[in-house]
Amino acid sequence: MSLRIAIQGVRGSNHHQVANDFYGKDISLVECLSFDALVDSLLEKRADKGIMAIENSIAGSIIPNYNLVYHNNLHIIGESYLSIHHNLMALNGQSIEDLEEVRTHPMALLQCKTFLKQHRHIKLVEDVDTAETARRIQAEQLTKVGAIAPKMAAKLYDLSILAPEIQTIKNNATRFIIVKTQNKELPKEEINKASVRFVLDHKRGSLATVLNVMSDCNLNLTKIQSLPIIEHPWKYAFFVDVTFNGYERFHKAKSLLEIMAEEFRVLGEYKNARL
Amino acid sequence: MSLRIAIQGVRGSNHHQVANDFYGKDISLVECLSFDALVDSLLEKRADKGIMAIENSIAGSIIPNYNLVYHNNLHIIGESYLSIHHNLMALNGQSIEDLEEVRTHPMALLQCKTFLKQHRHIKLVEDVDTAETARRIQAEQLTKVGAIAPKMAAKLYDLSILAPEIQTIKNNATRFIIVKTQNKELPKEEINKASVRFVLDHKRGSLATVLNVMSDCNLNLTKIQSLPIIEHPWKYAFFVDVTFNGYERFHKAKSLLEIMAEEFRVLGEYKNARL
C-alpha cells in the first residue's frame, strides 16, 4: 500500500506539490479542508503523515499550526521549502473584467494584495483552499468567479490563467513541515535540525542564558518566536529551531535545557532542507 | 482642532475602542479600510496618529504591520492592550438559521473557528473590517448576512446580537501600537519600553551575544521574533521589544547594539502599557 499523506487542500494545491517533492508521486493523498481536519486524519490513523505550512516570508510563523503540533503531541519528522506562485484563473473564455469575486485561501489573498488592489471591482472571498476553489469552478461551471491557485490546479481542472505570478513578493518561499503521531523516523546520523518549545519566566537574561547554552553546544539558531502564555502573564513560550552537526551536540543541549527551562519539549528532530 | 486619529476599520471597531482608551473621546476619527490606507493617511498628513493591531495571543505577531512600520519609517509612540470580544450580529428579527453568510475581518474568522464550525451552513466571507460589515448590513438592510464585531458596533448600527462572546479563546488580548511619522513624543523620564529591529548573520551565538548585552544593560525582553530576509538567505531580521527602568540603560544598550548588529533601528520608545 502506498504511503497515505494528508495535505491541507486538494489535488493541485501547494501542499500537494510539497507531498510530491518530499515523497514522490507514488503516494495516496488524503485531502483535508483545514489544518484541524489534517490533524484529525493523523490521530484517527486515516493518514500516515501530514504536510503542514508553518511559516512564510510575508506573514511569518503560522502560530495556530505550531499550537496544533504542540497540543496534539505530533512530531516533526521533516521540512520542505516551496517557492509559492499564485495565478488568477477562471473558466475558459472569462476575462478579469468578467470576474465579480475571487475566492482563495486567506494566505493567498494576503500575498496578492498589491495585484488585487488594482481590481477593486472584485470581491475577495476567503475559502478553505487554493486548488479546491479551482476544482469547484470547473465542477459547477461557475462564471464570474476566479480562483488564485498554483499552475498545477489550472492544468488539473482545465481553467485559463488570466494573470500569472500575481504574488506581491516574487520570491516567496514557504516552509512546510512533515508531521506524524509517533516519534523517531530518522537514524541519529541523519538528524541535523530540531524544533523545540520551552517556557521561561519573564526575568532579566533568562532567554540569553538559554541561548548561551545552545551556542556553547554548537547549535545554530535558525528561528525564534516568543508567544505570551495567556494564562500566565509573566511567562513566555518560545518556539526555537536549531541546526547542528552531530546529534550528540543536540543531545547534550537537551539534557541542559530540560533542567534550565520549564516544559521543555522537542517537537521534532529531522533533516535540514536548506543547505 | 481635536487630534486626528487614523484607525483600521470604522466607528465601532476594536481600533475605535483603543483610540478612545488611549486618547479619550474628543478625537476626530479617520476611518481606513486597510492598514496600508492607514499608513497613507499618516504620510499624507490627513491624520496625526494611527492605531494599529500588532499581535494577538492566537495568531502571534502581525508581521505585515511590523513591516509597514519599518518600511515607512513610522515611530511607535505608545501601546495599548484590548481584550477582544467577538459577537455575531444581524438585522433585528434574523436568527442564526436564517444566515447564509458571515462577513468579517479574517482575524475575527480565525478567532471564532470553533463556533463557526458548529454552523457549517454559513459561508465565511473575508471582509475589510468587523464594524464596517455591521454598518453595511444596516445601511443596505442585508438579510441572511451576519457580522462578527464588537458590542459597540451592534449598538451603533442597531443590530441584534445572535450569539455573544463567540471567540474560541475567551481571554484574547490583542496588543495595539500607536504610530506617527515623527519621532519623539514622550520625555525620556516616561519612556520604559522600546521596539527595535536589527539584522544578524546566521552565525553561532550571534543572537546570544546581543541578548547578553541587553541583559547586561538591565533590559527585559518581552518579545522576540525572527524573520528570514528573503534577499539574503543567511541573514535574519529580529523584531525585539524590551522594557527597562531608566532611559539611560536603554541608551547605553543602543550605543552597543548599533556597533554589534547590522541595520539596528529603534522603531519606537514609549510607555509600557502592561504593568
Image: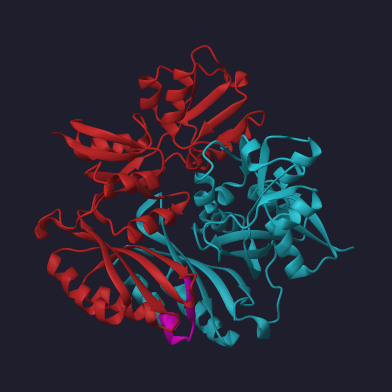
Chain colours: A red, B cyan
- Residue B98, relative to residue B160: is it above or below? above
Question: Is residue B60 a member of the stretch shown in magenta?
Answer: no
B10 or A29, which is in the foreground? A29
Examine the rendered structure and indicate whether residue A93 appears above or below residue A240. Answer: above
Front in this rendered view, residue B155 or A218: B155
Q: Position of residue A129 (x, y in %)?
A: 44, 36
- Residue furthest to the right in view is B1
Left or right: where does residue B218 sit relative to residue B37? left
User: Which residue is pictured at 78% across the width and 36% down the height?
Assistant: B141
| Quadrant (top left, top right, bottom left, bottom right) of the C terminus of chain B | bottom right
Q: Is residue B178 left or right of residue A151?
A: right
> Where in the figure is residue B269, as x and y percent of width and height?
61, 74
Residue B260 in percent (x, y) is at 41, 73
* Picture quadrant where residue A190 is located: bottom left
Total marks shown come to 0
Quarter where residue B195 is shown: bottom right
Q: Is residue B214 magenta?
A: yes
Asked where in the image residue B151 lies, by quadrant, the reply is: bottom right
| Residue visible at 19% across and 69% down in the picture | A250
Region of the chain picked out in magenta, as a range: B213-223
Is residue A26 something one can see in this rendering?
yes
Is the residue B273 above or below the residue A190 in the image?
A: below
Residue A180 percent location from the top left of the image: 24, 51
- Viewer-proximal residue, A212 or A107? A107
